[in-house]
Amino acid sequence: MTQTVTHSVPDDLERRPDPYPWLEELRAAGPVRRLRIRGDFDAWIVTRYDDVRRALTDPRLSSDQRHAADVYAANPLFRRKTDKPTSMLLAEAPDHGRLRGAVSRAFTARRVELLRPRIQEIADGLIDAFAARGTADLVGEYAFPLPIEVICELLGVPADDHDRFRDLSAKVVTPARDPAGMGAIVLAFEQLKAYVRELVARKYVERGNDLLSELVEAGEAGVLSDEEIAASGVLLLVGGHETTANLIGTSIRLLLRHPEHLAAVRADPAVLPRAIEEYMRIDGPNVLGVYRHTTEDVTIGGVTIPRGQIVVLSISAANHDPDRFERPGLVDLDRPDNAHLSFGHGMHYCLGAPLARLEGDLAIATILRRLPDLRLVVAPDELVWRPAVLRGLESLPIQFSATT
Ligand code: HEM
């Protein structure tokens, strides 16, 4: 290893008004840099679009943390990674294909499309709850609860359990401000896993027309273990909640910040999906990047990363790379060929991307239709970002003409 660690991930990276100059500095310093990541691990970061995209399809860069077990174990607070992953997100071939195959057979385009009327109902119901008030926090009262309700529907969480599920999901994504807060998150995560395990057991007895019931059938056919079914359920929730909530909040902020975008979307609703893609490129939920682990020595941009290392593939740095996106800092709804990497790329490409896009489109279109004169209570640049690992707004206070 020739490079020494020259950078540390700033604690406040995701809540900076503009986190991207820090990544640009890294890219300017070289295509691959050594840095200390949160949790105090030494890692490598890849920042150029072409390198990140290629690395996302390189089998020598694995999601399985066991390949860098020594690096993780160097921090006494972290357990040595020895367990075989039960979640596709951390699995590699051939398990990844089996896990992802079973979930994608149940999570079809048809199932997503069937959710459309329910998502509309959920969006309208959330707006009904505050429409008469003339003020709302669009993050707390809309962007956050909406994806949880959608996932309840997708997984087949019974109506009586929605409150419990909502409560645990909210705790899992509540930013930890101290060790007690961290303990509360770990506890909520364990309780959520226990709840999903319990739900899986119930689906064995009584099937519904939902995704978890289909996974239980894959369990009966011997394709998935019960632990893998539960891990898939938890992954769909955790992977699809905060990310989608942030997408909705950030997109509404950017629309209100750019009145010309708002006018374009109002004139032609077909512009909205394009706007959402550009908002995901310019300010997506994943700022730092996705983690991989080298299974052998890998050379990227002339730098050789030894086997057994943690590598961060920076999605946001790639999305802001001027060699790939002309004037990357400009929010341009007419950007041609906007192949951003916010949903990843390659074998771990986001399985929920079609659902996230549908939720984003319906949620934002419904707000614009129902609250035609909505305006922010504070300036768009004064909004506060959540102290979390994903980038999202803490709140989005708005005013509008009250309706009954
Ligand atoms: C994977 C982003 C919404 C389920 C991923 C990955 C990214 C991502 C970057 C790749 C991770 C990696 O390569 O290590 C997002 C964003 C979303 C979103 C930005 C919203 C704006 C959703 C939703 C669901 C979902 C709504 C499901 C309900 C998944 C799953 C994977 C995944 C299951 C793992 C795929 C695999 O490992 O093969 N997501 N996601 N995501 N996402 Fe999403």
Image: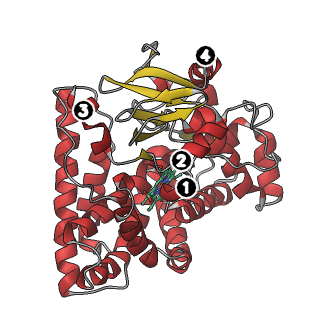
Label 2–label 4 contact, CB within 8 A = no
Label 2–label 1 contact, CB within 8 A = yes
Quadrant of the rendering where the C terminus is positioned: bottom right
* Cα separation between marks 2 and 4: 22 Å
Residue that mark 3 sits on: 70
Label 4–label 1 contact, CB within 8 A = no
* Cα separation between marks 2 and 3: 23 Å
139 shown above or below 227: above
Return the disc, 2 or 1, that comes first in the chain's sequence. 2
> Disc 3 marks which amino acid?
Asp
Return the disc, 3 or 1, that comes first in the chain's sequence. 3
Residue 38: where, in percent of width, then height? 35, 26
> Disc 2 marks which amino acid?
Leu
Return the disc, 2 or 4, that comes first in the chain's sequence. 4
In the image, what residue occupies the spot 63% across and 32% down?
A: 48
201 shown above or below 368: below
Q: Nearer the viewer, residue 231 or 203?
A: 231
**Mark 4 surroundings within 10 Å by alpha-carbon count, few (fewer than 14), some (14 through 19), many (20 or more):** few
Residue that mark 4 sits on: 29
- Mark 1, ligand 1, within 8 Å: the answer is yes
Residue 86: where, in percent of width, then height? 27, 59
- In the structure shown, which secondary structural element does the residue marked by tag 4 occupy? helix
**Mark 2 surroundings within 10 Å by alpha-carbon count, few (fewer than 14), some (14 through 19), many (20 or more):** many
Q: Which mark is residue 56?
A: 2
- Mark 2, ligand 1, within 8 Å: the answer is yes
Q: Which mark is residue 346?
A: 1
- In the structure shown, which secondary structural element does the residue marked by tag 3 occupy? helix
